[in-house]
Image (cartoon, rainbow, N blue to C red):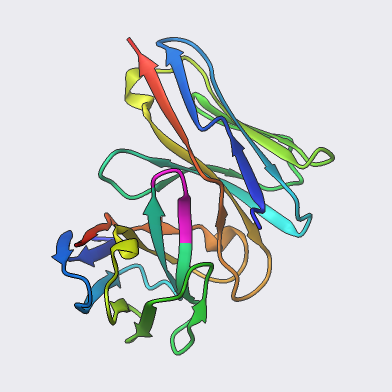
Amino acid sequence: NAGVTQTPKFQVLKTGQSMTLQCAQDMNHNSMYWYRQDPGMGLRLIYYSASEGTTDKGEVPNGYNVSRLNKREFSLRLESAAPSQTSVYFCASSEAHTSRLKTQYFGPGTRLLVL
Amino acid sequence: QQQVKQSPQSLIVQKGGISIINCAYENTAFDYFPWYQQFPGKGPALLIAIRPDVSEKKEGRFTISFNKSAKQFSLHIMDSQPGDSATYFCAAIFNQAGTALIFGKGTTLSVSS
């Protein structure tokens, strides 16, 4: 089991460029999440997908879009990157909706630098 | 609105000492409280978790103490080791469909040898 995988590991963009961060999980989990992590800010939820076919905004959704492609894959798109989006992005997944099964498993992260 | 407050922001402990990280929450609808450990360059990983009907949970050197009336919970790391140096996040979850984890802002622990 690879768990949660993310691509790319590192990316440099120029302001205004677009890109898609890919995430896949092989644990047959229903729910998937995208977070950003910035120094001193902890983990902030961008978007999540409680189940296949649904997506919802989190705490900081502006400037991002997501697609739950199938049960395994959940992508995050930056349409027009801004320097404020320089961050480390983590994808996570969880089994189901009940509290104990909401425990999340994280990928290794994507480090994004926007110049 | 920060629903889970974590302290301290950073902590330095000598090898063999006890590390204590505290969290406080506001919403009594939370019903599951996990702790995550994150090493530099890695994603967070579940360390230990507790439900509010339990006052303490221990796994090896790691213990969660839970005070429901005070709406506080804490992580204790006994006999702290240099390999425990990492960032620790407390979190809380509602028992409600479609909601996600709410994290504290993290504590960076350094264990000196």
Magenta segment, which residues?
A39-44
Residue B73 appears at what percent x and percent y?
A: 68, 37
Instruction: Please tell me whether residue A23 belongs to the stretch shown in magenta.
Output: no
Tell me, yes or no, if residue A73 can be seen here.
no
Horizontal arrangement in the rendering, residue A88 relative to residue B11 (left or right): left
Residue plotted at (32% across, 9% down): B113
- Answer with the quarter of the image where residue A89 lies: bottom left
Q: Is residue B83 above or below residue A11?
A: above
Please state which of residues A65 and A4 is positioned toward the viewer in this rendering. Answer: A65
Residue B6 appears at what percent x and percent y?
A: 59, 39
Please state which of residues A105 and A57 is positioned toward the viewer in this rendering. Answer: A57
Residue A12 appears at what percent x and percent y?
A: 15, 63
Horizontal arrangement in the rendering, residue B29 relative to residue B64 (left or right): right
Residue plotted at (45% across, 90% down): A53
- Quarter of the rendering occupied by the N terminus of chain A: bottom left
Residue located farthest toward the right when viewing the structure as drawn:
B69
Residue located farthest toward the bottom when viewing the structure as drawn:
A53
Tell me, yes or no, if residue B85 can be seen here.
yes
- Answer with the quarter of the image where residue B72 lies: top right
Q: Is residue B79 above or below residue A71?
A: above
